[in-house]
Image (tube, rainbow, N blue to C red):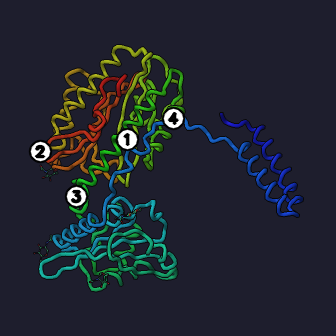
């Protein structure tokens, strides 16, 4: 039970009264000890009651044993980047904290907030007798250099500092001394930094890095796939736990906070769920109206959270045991489910991204709902929720072993109903698509069995 406000005030008054008494009696040590004990006992029995969590999923331990990315994997990524630099005649690669900062240097924007003062993560290639190695350096604001040196960058890092009254980019030039030519800057680097670098390095060509740099990130390693599997499995388990706690009449905001508690309980960071009831789900990225769930409504949950930096993305459209879902809406649910299955069978190594999208779309065309499938089938997933390669009609990218994608067909009829089902998958060593949620049963079975 939660303590009422009045009760809390009583507790405070009691404590206010006891403290002067302790002070008065504290003239003799024996009495001091006795009264202190009484006080501690009193404050224990009348202390604030712990708030009761809204849901208890018991999922906290589920991913606790998942191995994070180790040092040797980071060093390997840096070496592959150095080889890419050599291949493209580029002398350096420079990034800010972010997704690629996390991939190559283990530095995300939660480790280092992006401010107007640049912190630059730099890799150059060291070549000796045909072997390419990566040389990692960091340019940091001088007053922050102690903090920068605490960043857990798995490498032998050389630090360069720039004092507040000097141009940081001149110091970047010093860090790159003797290396003119092409300098790759990460695609997500802010323009004022890229411009500043170009101005300070007039003889260099500061260009956005080749797409090949991003491709190093696209095919996931075994360790990455294990993290992605656990994150996606536990997200689905959290949705199922919340599904059991829903009732007719619950509001979108209440269901959304149940999901937030469940995902936090599951140990995921940066977590959240789109939570939309009935016709609100017809706007695929809608924010809802906080309406109550009625008997005839589906509830849509599109949830994400990160584990060791890697994101999950799972969507379920559910009904309750006592729901009375209109027949047409139930047909739509099963059609979306069939489209998801068809796309999963079509995805294979060597195939094209647009063909997978087309498979789901052509199934929905046969049953007359393709015009209500208004978005692409899916996206790559990893250190970003949405990343390359994408599964859409305009993509002729070839699918490769260890690529990861979402598979999320939907049907959205504005003012009426929205259904989306989403599971992410990877391409296994045999070239086949395997759902990242397979460890907990994979795809939904029905609106009542997510
Ligand atoms: C990467 O950074 C995290 C903290 O964000 C740290 O716990 C982990 O040990 C680092 N990894 C390596 C291999 O240094
Ligand atoms: C790199 O430089 C070499 C020699 O200067 C040249 O032959 C090659 O075409 C260049 N490669 C690229 C990708 O620019
Ligand atoms: C690594 O790069 C930095 C910055 O360019 C340079 O000062 C340093 O000498 C390089 N280390 C080696 C071993 O070449
Ligand atoms: C894909 O499309 C691009 C741009 O239209 C084209 O340059 C490229 O050659 C195509 N690749 C394949 C594999 O068809």
Q: How far, Cα to Cα, is label 2 from label 1?
A: 26 Å
Q: How far, Cα to Cα, is label 3 from label 2?
A: 21 Å
Whether residues under marks 2 and 1 lie with C-beta atoms below 8 angstroms apart, the answer is: no
Q: How far, Cα to Cα, is label 3 from label 4?
A: 40 Å
Q: Identify residue for label 2.
A: 430
Q: Nearer the viewer, residue 350 or 181?
A: 350
In this rendering, which labeled residue sits more in front, label 4 or label 2? 4
Q: In the structure shown, which secondary structural element does the residue marked by tag 3 occupy? A: helix
In the depicted structure, whether residue 130 falls above or below residue 77: below
Q: In the structure shown, which secondary structural element does the residue marked by tag 2 occupy? A: loop
Q: Identify residue for label 1.
A: 234
Q: In the structure shown, which secondary structural element does the residue marked by tag 4 occupy? A: loop
Q: Residue furthest front?
A: 30
Within 10 Å of the Cα at label 2, are there few (<14), some (14-19), or many (20+) other Cα atoms?
A: few
Q: Identify residue for label 4.
A: 55
In the rendered image, the quadrant that contains the N terminus is top right
In this rendering, which labeled residue sits more in front, label 3 or label 4? 4
- For residue 31, side relative to residue 335 (left or right): right
- Labels 3 and 2: the sequence-earlier one: 3
Q: Is mark 1 within 8 Å of ligand 1?
A: no
Q: Is mark 3 within 8 Å of ligand 4?
A: no
- Labels 2 and 1: the sequence-earlier one: 1
- Labels 3 and 4: the sequence-earlier one: 4
Image mark for residue 333? none
Residue 376 in sight here:
no
Whether residues under marks 1 and 4 lie with C-beta atoms below 8 angstroms apart, the answer is: no
Q: Identify residue for label 3.
A: 215
């Amino acid at each position: 039970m939660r303590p009422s406000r009045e009760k809390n005030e009583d507790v405070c008054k009691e404590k206010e009264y006891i403290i002067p008494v302790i002070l008065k009696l504290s003239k003799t040590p024996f009495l001091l000890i006795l009264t202190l004990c009484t006080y501690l006992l009193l404050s224990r029995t009348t202390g604030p009651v712990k708030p009761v969590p809204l849901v208890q999923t018991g999922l906290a331990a589920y991913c606790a044993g998942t191995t994070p990315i180790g040092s040797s994997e980071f060093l390997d990524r840096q070496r592959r980047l150095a080889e890419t630099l050599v291949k493209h005649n580029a002398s350096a690669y420079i990034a800010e904290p972010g997704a690629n900062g996390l991939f190559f240097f283990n530095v995300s924007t939660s480790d280092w907030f992006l401010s107007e003062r640049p912190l630059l993560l730099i890799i150059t290639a060291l070549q000796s007798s045909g072997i390419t190695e990566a040389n990692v350096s960091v340019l940091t604001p001088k007053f922050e250099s102690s903090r920068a040196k605490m960043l857990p960058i798995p490498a032998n890092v050389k630090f360069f500092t720039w004092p507040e009254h000097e141009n940081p980019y001149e110091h970047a030039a010093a860090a790159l001394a003797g290396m003119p030519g092409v300098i790759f800057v990460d695609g997500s680097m802010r323009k004022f930094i890229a411009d500043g670098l170009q101005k300070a390095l007039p003889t260099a060509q500061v260009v956005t890095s080749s797409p090949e740099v991003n491709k190093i990130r696209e095919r996931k390693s075994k360790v990455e796939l294990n993290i992605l599997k656990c994150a996606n499995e536990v997200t689905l388990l959290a949705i199922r736990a919340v599904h059991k706690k829903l009732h007719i009449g619950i509001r979108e905001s209440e269901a959304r906070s149940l999901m937030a508690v469940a995902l936090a309980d599951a140990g995921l960071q940066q977590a959240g769920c789109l939570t939309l009831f009935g016709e609100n789900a017809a706007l695929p990225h809608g924010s809802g109206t906080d309406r109550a769930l009625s008997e005839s409504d589906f509830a849509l949950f599109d949830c994400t959270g990160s584990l060791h930096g890697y994101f999950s993305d799972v969507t379920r459209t559910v009904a309750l045991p006592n729901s009375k879902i209109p027949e047409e809406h139930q047909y739509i649910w099963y059609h979306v489910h069939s489209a998801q299955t068809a796309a999963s069978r079509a995805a294979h190594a060597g195939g094209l991204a647009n063909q997978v999208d087309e498979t789901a779309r052509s199934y929905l065309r046969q049953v007359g709902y393709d015009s209500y499938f208004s978005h692409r089938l899916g996206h790559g997933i990893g250190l970003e929720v949405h990343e390359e390669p994408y599964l859409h009609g305009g993509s002729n990218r070839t699918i490769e072993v260890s690529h990861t994608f979402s598979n999320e067909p939907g049907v959205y009829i504005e003012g009426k109903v929205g259904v989306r089902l989403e599971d992410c998958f990877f391409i296994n060593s045999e070239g086949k698509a395997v759902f990242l949620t397979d460890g907990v049963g994979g795809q939904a079975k029905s609106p009542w069995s997510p």
